Image: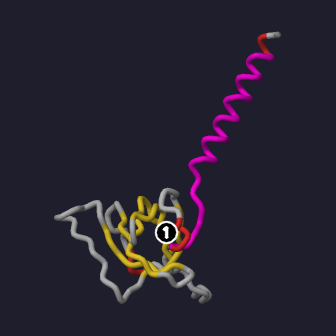
Amino acid sequence: MKKIHIVGIIVIAVAIGVILTSLKNTSTYADFNEALANPDQEYHVVGKLNKNEPTVYDPKVNADEFTFTLVDNKGVEKRVVLHKSKPQDFERSEQIVVIGKMHGEEFHANDILMKCPSKYNDAKPQS
């Protein structure tokens, strides 16, 4: 075999390894019931903040723990423990995506994505 063929085979093997590794670590969108059924798998859960329930963030006690209640798109309500500080303008968010796993009846999130209200409106600019 020529050296170019060996290099080509190695490049293909590395590419296959990278693809398989990236597919293994992907998480999927789900609701709380699916996350509860598979507690070992990481999920993205989409929902809205329940503003009737309290949010708990005390940076003096633990700056990397923020707790709130989220209602997923199917209406299931769960307590979420975010292992980060409280995001800015959290209460103003329209939709929240938490990324993490279920631990018992709580969802432990290691990341959060928020959709905040638009700063722009449909009004025409003034001349």
Query: Which residue is at 49% across, 68% downward?
Result: 36
> Nearest the camera: 122 or 61?
61
Q: Tell me, what colour scheme is on the image?
A: secondary structure
Circle 1 packing at 10 Å, graded few (<14), some (14-19), many (20+), is some
Q: Is residue 9 magenta?
A: yes
- Residue 8 vs 73, above or below: the answer is above
> Nearest the camera: 35 or 21?
35
Residue 102 locus on image (x, y percent): 44, 65
From the image, which quarter does the N terminus lie in? top right
Query: Which residue is at 34% across, 61% downward?
Result: 84
- As drawn, is 4 to the left or to the right of 32? right
According to the image, label 1 marks what residue? Answer: 36
Residue 58 locus on image (x, y percent): 22, 69
Residue 31 locus on image (x, y percent): 55, 73
Asked whether residue 16 is in view, the answer is yes
Query: Which residue is at 50% across, 69% downward?
Result: 97
User: In the image, which residues are magenta?
Assistant: 5-32
Residue lying at the far left of the rendered structure:
60
Asked whether residue 119 is in view, the answer is no
Q: Secondary structure at mark 1?
A: helix
Q: Classify residue 61 by image quadrant.
A: bottom left
Q: Classify residue 22 by image quadrant.
A: top right
